[in-house]
């Protein structure tokens, strides 16, 4: 049987739904948003799939401890797939999730450290790593159990930097498993990866190499992985074919840019609540042009330099004073982490500096809104003239797709060349180096001054690209990769040439 | 005529000598130290060579403005080569040297930025870059003039990150010139290089590609350059042959680890002044073991983490209290730059913390000496038991060679895996990840506890490696590379395969 029809088993840190109890004690399921969840659930429903994730709410944990090994049939919520929740002890979860995944792996892949002073690896990091290993092993064991319960061999889709060791552990438990791993983040180059303690670096590289197929959002991240992996003893790389060979197995390195759930998003954006919010925003903006940014308050997003570039634009172009506003919708993220809290304060302070330098009673050039406001973002996407997406590094960046999809004013996208989205959308965007204030300021100016025909042409190009790559394709191409790996496994190919 | 016998023209920012006036108005020439100067002067003397450099002292500038285009025959100082000094206006020199070379290129190649906040590229950087371009053009023009005055085509050896554009500019002026460029620094990977403004990044990459041969101290730096260069439009890479093809030309990427002037160093270390200093240090250390570090006070050198690792060692091994001392000889560097001044203060503060936590009236575990003390370093090399060389990134690191060469106690070398020297000396050193305090602390312990036979075996291995690679070889191999390039140029080879 082709793996395209095989049972699908997904593993990710967060599941597609979070369970809660309603007032009467009944079970509620809140579904996560986004292309990944939509695409994977769609695919799973066709094949009676199962999604393994860590329990996150109290109710999750209650279910995880339940009779069927934490399995929940989603039929009672009208869906045709199952969820399996793993109960991870809180301290272990904290080490795995906060300290290793978000405190170290996220930092390394986005080049976030102030290397002269950070990071410092000591015994505590060592102990936290042991917990990361334990959680990854727990996931792998759960996946192996699912393989045993499945009448035909399933296709495993393992997600992201939280679960880099799962492919290898699962391979050890079930040598014949068909395993794909997908990295949604940027991936650091080899020299920067050498910051990690040896066993962490080798652990995640060899962990991922347990898969048959490794997926990345863009060529840069795939290439960085290839170059790091081939530096390990016993690993050979065929760069031309983007394939690695290790322990007699082949590992294909593939690029599959994910997209967004266009249909779902457009439906939400057309609803009465978003319509009302849009009207309200339109009143607020008056007859000014609107520069928008929508981001998590995240170190990678480069929010401070965004305001600095805007200030440089205003300084260079006084003719635009009072004719433009910058709306920054920032959703709080990891606010219990000192680095993030400090950064949030720096963002707000920088916006205030801009307002102090250029604003007056009638015109405040920047408005920052720090809160979770998903519907407000959908509304703002519709009416912005310029969308600024300038992360220092970003695996993909979905804002760069959501904005153009929902925009109604032929808005211009100013896009960092270091976002994965740049490789897909770059030619219709105004590309900027996120560290270059002058280039960013000039792009804002050019976007505001751009003739209508060019704006329309670019905006159409962007939404065409977004629509032409539905999120389902992202799942399908991974399964096709796995199917090719299955066929290849039965017809051994010659060894790739030595390190090319 | 083979290029091995051709006239040699060297270009570097600093020349081999600095000129001054003595009390009577006569000319004095202070020669720089180190393997590079010794090796290049040795090679130049054999072929009546010439060294082009920026004027640095007042007398330099006076000579640069002199009759013969700034050329000074070193015959009057008993040497058989010439120096040509270029007078660069101070503001231009400041932009080229401090702001671009040391403020940006040094930072990018050693991953020094706190990327969330630094760098910020604005119009000032843009203007400074123009000055860097102008200085590089000035050097290239001077080299082209030397080519015209030479009866046979010279071999050009261009040095380091200050002069990355010289190969290309010289190639434009003299398309047939034989040009080698050598990078003495680390080289950043492509993803981090993307921090640079587009025209800076492309400028330095394409500038260097003007050479026939590009030299690096280690495989990591050569590979990073190859991967960055092949990302440029029109550049093709043959990674297996470590060769690039651009504009119909071939560029060989080669690894030539430089070494030190062993003979000269041993002579200096045997002199009466160093002998007296050694005796004094021996009295000071008493019957304790001595851990030594010798560094410029430089962000890359990882001095703070060195003290932190030592503290971790002392915390884990109270049995070593009072039995060991850590001597840090730090020579001030770029102390007018705020980043460096702050870092120097952090280093001293960290050492004080260690002394406060572990020391008492009789035993201060750390001694920091911040001053230029070259002879003191030579003395200390002789009597140390452990030499700590733990840079976060370092093109080569000569301390790792000088120490073992001069050491008389079978001292152990603890060496960062991110120093170019690691690729040459690693197997006889205790290798550490410079960010990993635990690994570094354990290496210090292991070094102190190491049986005498193992110490002797390792120490011999180190000095054998240093002696087996005299600095002259570094020059000769580059000239051999250039000669191969000359022959290849006459017999056009097939195009390398597409991006492999």
Image (tube, coloured by chain):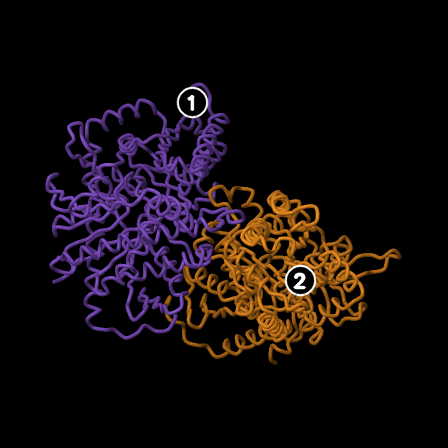
Chain colours: A purple, B orange
The answer to which quarter of the image holds residue A254 is bottom left
Q: Residue at x 48, y 55 (%)?
A: B202
Residue sticking out furthest to the top:
A361
Mark 2 secondary-structure assignment: loop
Q: In this rendering, would A22 be left or right of A456?
A: left
Image coordinates of residue B431 in percent, x first then y, are 52, 63
Assess disc 2: are there few (<14), some (14-19) or many (≥20) residues with their C-alpha within 10 Å of its C-alpha. many
Q: In this rendering, would B421 be left or right of B86?
A: left
The dot on residue A257 is: none
The answer to which quarter of the image holds residue A141 is bottom left
Using the rendered image of the protein, determine whether residue B212 is visible from the camera's viewpoint: no
The dot on residue B384 is: 2
Q: How far is mark 2 from mark 1, CA to CA?
A: 67 Å
Using the rendered image of the protein, determine whether residue B281 is visible from the camera's viewpoint: yes
Count of marks, rendered view: 2
Q: Nearer the viewer, residue A459 or B360?
A: B360
Q: Residue at x 44, y 77 (%)?
A: B493
Q: Are marks 2 and 1 in contact (CB under 8 Å)?
A: no
Q: Quadrant of the C terminus of chain A?
A: bottom left
Image coordinates of residue B438 in percent, x first then y, are 50, 54
Q: In this rendering, would B99 be left or right of A350?
A: right
Image coordinates of residue B118 in percent, x first then y, are 51, 43
Mark 1 secondary-structure assignment: loop
Q: Nearer the viewer, residue B371 or B45?
A: B371
Q: Is residue B105 above or below residue B337?
A: below
User: Which residue is label 1 attached to?
Assistant: A363
């Amino acid at each position: 049987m082709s793996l395209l029809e095989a049972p699908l088993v997904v593993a990710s840190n967060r599941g597609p739904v979070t369970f809660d109890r309603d007032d009467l004690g009944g079970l509620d399921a809140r579904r996560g948003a986004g292309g990944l969840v939509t695409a994977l659930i769609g695919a799973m429903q066709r094949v009676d799939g199962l999604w393994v994730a860590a329990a996150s709410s109290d109710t999750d944990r209650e279910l995880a401890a339940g009779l069927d090994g934490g399995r929940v049939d989603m039929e009672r919520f009208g869906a045709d797939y199952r969820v399996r929740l793993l109960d991870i002890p809180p301290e272990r979860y904290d080490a795995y999730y906060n300290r290793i995944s978000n405190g170290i792996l996220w930092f390394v892949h986005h080049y976030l450290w102030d290397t002269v002073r950070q990071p410092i690896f000591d015994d505590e990091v060592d102990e936290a790593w042991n917990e990361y290993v334990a959680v990854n092993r727990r996931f792998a064991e759960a996946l192996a159990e699912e393989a045993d319960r499945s009448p035909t061999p399933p296709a495993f889709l393992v997600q992201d930097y939280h679960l880099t060791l799962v492919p290898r552990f699962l391979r050890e438990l079930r040598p014949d498993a068909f395993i794909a791993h997908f990295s949604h983040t940027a991936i650091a180059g080899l020299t920067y990866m050498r910051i990690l303690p040896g066993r962490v670096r080798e652990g995640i590289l060899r962990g991922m190499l347990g898969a048959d197929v490794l997926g990345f959002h863009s060529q840069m991240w795939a290439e960085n992985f290839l170059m790091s992996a081939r530096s390990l003893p016993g690993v050979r790389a065929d760069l031309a074919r983007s394939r690695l060979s290790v322990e007699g197995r082949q590992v294909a390195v593939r690029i599959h840019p994910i997209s967004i759930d266009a249909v779902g998003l457009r439906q939400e954006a057309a609803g009465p609540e978003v319509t009302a919010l849009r009207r309200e925003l339109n009143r607020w903006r008056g007859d000014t042009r609107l520069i928008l940014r929508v981001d998590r308050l995240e170190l990678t997003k480069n929010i401070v330099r965004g305001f600095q570039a805007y200030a440089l634009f205003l300084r260079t172009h006084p003719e635009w004073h009072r004719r433009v506003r910058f709306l920054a919708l920032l959703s709080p993220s990891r606010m219990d982490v000192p680095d993030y809290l400090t950064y949030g304060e720096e963002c707000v302070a920088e916006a205030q500096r801009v307002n102090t330098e250029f604003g007056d009673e009638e015109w405040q050039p920047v408005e920052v809104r720090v809160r979770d406001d998903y519907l407000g973002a959908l509304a703002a996407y519709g009416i912005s003239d310029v969308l600024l997406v300038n992360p220092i590094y970003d695996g993909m960046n979905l804002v760069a797709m959501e904005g153009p999809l929902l925009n109604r004013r032929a808005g211009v996208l100013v896009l960092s060349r270091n976002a994965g989205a740049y490789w897909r959308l770059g030619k219709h965007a105004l590309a900027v180096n996120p560290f270059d204030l002058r280039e960013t300021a000039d792009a804002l100016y050019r976007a505001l001054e751009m003739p209508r025909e060019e704006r329309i042409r670019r905006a159409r190009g962007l939404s065409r690209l977004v629509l032409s790559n539905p999120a389902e394709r992202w799942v399908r191409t991974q399964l096709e990769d796995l199917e090719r790996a299955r066929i290849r496994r039965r017809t051994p190919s010659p060894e790739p040439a030595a390190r090319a």
